[in-house]
Image (tube, rainbow, N blue to C red):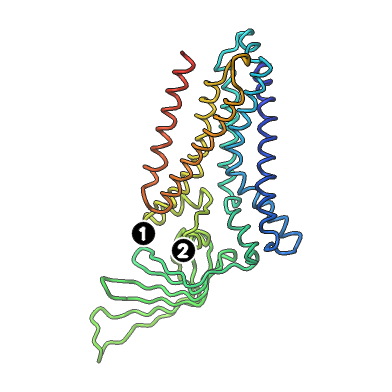
Amino acid sequence: MNILTRYILKKYLINFIIVLISMEIFFVGIDFLQNFSMIPKSANLRLLYILYNAFFTLTLALPLSIVFGWIITLVVFIKNNEFVAFNAIGATNREILSPVITISIFLLSLLILLQMTPLAYSYDQKKRILDNEYFTNSKSDIFLKYNDYYVYFKKLLPLEKRAEGIHIFKISGKDVVETIVGEKAYFQNDRWYVADVKIIKKPKDLDIESSKLEVTYEKFLHTLDGFKPKILDNVYESRSEFSIFDAISAVALLKEQGINTDKIRSILYNQIVIPFFVIPLLLLIFAYASLNSRFFNIGKFTSISIFGTLVIWGIFFVLYKFTGGGVISPELSILLPMLLWVTISIYFYNKKINS
């Protein structure tokens, strides 16, 4: 790493950190004050609420801070005529821009890694604190399809990885041919184990006068392979909070069951694709910056850059919401617009740089 690269990175990272901390304090502070009366009086829960909210805010603040930090850095370089000095020592546009692009991709990758952890459920956790459900979280009357079976949970406790009142129905055509009943079920080794099972089978040729139901008992029975309690909870509640690993697992599992996965795929793309919308913005903002402050309207440049960033972010946000509502497929609403955005940005960048 040469001196120029270190200098640019130092200036940029200082501005990035200042913007990021400012945005975190602003959004977390506003939210805390708005919900202060609803937050439990426990100091520990209030601290947890702030921490969960800080990470939830980070998913928005970090991509925007990457762009806003770069705008501030460019404005400082222009006002101090540092671009003139860079050119004087023979620095190319690529040498000026590449350190910022590289560190930005690293920061976005770090954000994606964090969303592979339980921190991805930060919004859910802070909401549970507000609802006084942080230590006791349960769902009732969950009904879902699994292969040839329909599974009913009277009560699901995701945090404890267990359920109560389990009924499993095997369907053949329009008839229920087998019913499995269990009082309790536990999630272990990536599958559900139903304890003290009662199995009721209906004869193939049912005769009301002579046929009898076959009743057997089992100590354990496993079902719903791969359906983690958190996946069951989120799918049932139609929530938009998934860790990346859980989202990938949910897509694979629901696809096997013939269930529409558009919403979960859109959540996945929102986590791993949409944050990179800022990289083309870095290119465009740099291309339309001036080397000399003498004939350059810095105020206009700053205003247009910030406004343009918010517009592009708003467009992808709206597209994501449309997909979550099942209006269009996530590939058409997220991946295709992202590809077009990258292509158009590179075209205008090259056009401006080479003009």
Q: Residue at x 49, y 65 (%)?
A: 192
Question: What amino acid is labelled 1 in the image?
Answer: Gln
Residue 139 position in % (x across, y down): 53, 69
Residue 97 position in % (x across, y down): 57, 21
Kind of element beneath mark 2: helix
Left or right: residue 297 compared with residue 144: right
Image quarter where the N terminus lies is top right
Query: Which disc is residue 236 wearing?
Result: 2
Question: What amino acid is labelled 2 in the image?
Answer: Tyr
Which residue is tagged 1? 257
Q: Quadrant of residue 342?
A: top left
- Of the pair 186 and 348, the residue shown nearer to us: 348
Left or right: residue 108 compared with residue 50: left
Q: Residue at x 47, y 18 (%)?
A: 352
Query: Do tag 2 and tag 1 residues touch (Cβ < 8 Å)?
Result: no
Density class for disc 2 (Cα within 10 Å; few <14, some 14-19, many ≥20) is some
Query: Which disc is residue 243 wearing?
Result: none
Kind of element beneath mark 1: loop
Image height of 118 relative to 339, above or below: below
